[in-house]
Image (tube, rainbow, N blue to C red):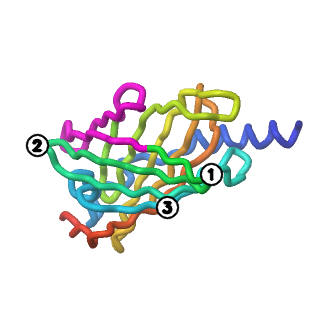
Amino acid sequence: MVKGVVILFLGLLAGCGGTRIEDFAGGQSQMRPEHFFVGRLQGSGVFVDLFGNVRDQFVMDMNGHLRGDDVILDELFTFKDGRQERRVWTIRKTGEDRYEGRAADVIGVATGRTAGNVLNWRFVLPVDVGLGHVDALFDQWMFLQDSGVLINKAEVSTHGLPIGQVIVAFHRLDGPVASLP
């Protein structure tokens, strides 16, 4: 019991950390969803619970294309147990460094902001926690590496309490996108 309370407290304390999008401005590499997510991509990831246990593993096959000013991103998740989920995003640039996204299973509108090689993407999604579904906030930090790999770390919480992390590494199947100045 005490161990669980200590871990919960440390999780809450860690959630108060200070990653700020502004800290990534000015880098040479630029993360722009309208460039990176157009084409064929693949990702491999895990869901890690609050206690550090890997609860699920998956691969993602993604295909993105432009439709007018929107990026249409079709994601197919295949989980270790064989089940599949599909999510189709419509992502639109709404400002110099700001984005919005919509998908059928996402509650409301996803919002994103870029600076340098980083995209911070936030959205609410119903997730199964074993005893039913909860509306979970995904606070994703995507880091575009010079190698062309995109590293994604999402803090997942519900009602302000952390429930785990999703960690994914993405790579392009049709070659790296040239970095924007």
The residue beneath circle 3 is 44
From the viewer's perspective, is 175 left or right of 168? Answer: left
Q: Residue at x 41, y 31 (%)?
A: 106
Q: Give the range drawn in magenta.
A: 86-110
Under circle 3, the secondary element is strand
Label whose residue precedes the other's in the sequence (2 or 1):
1
- In x, y percent, where is residue 128? 60, 34
- Give the quarter of the figure containing the C terminus: bottom left
Under circle 2, the secondary element is loop
**Vertical placement of residue 92 versus 84, above or below:** above
Q: Residue at x 34, y 29 (%)?
A: 109
**Farthest residue toward the front?**
82
Label whose residue precedes the other's in the sequence (2 or 3):
3
The amino acid type found where label 3 is placed reads Ser
Determine contact: label 2, label 3, CB under 8 Å: no
Label whose residue precedes the other's in the sequence (3 or 1):
3
The residue beneath circle 2 is 68
Name the image quarter holding residue 24. Answer: bottom left
The residues tagged by marks 2 and 1 sit, at their Cα atoms, a distance apart of 36 Å
Say if the magenta span includes residue 90: yes
- Give the quarter of the figure containing the N terminus: top right
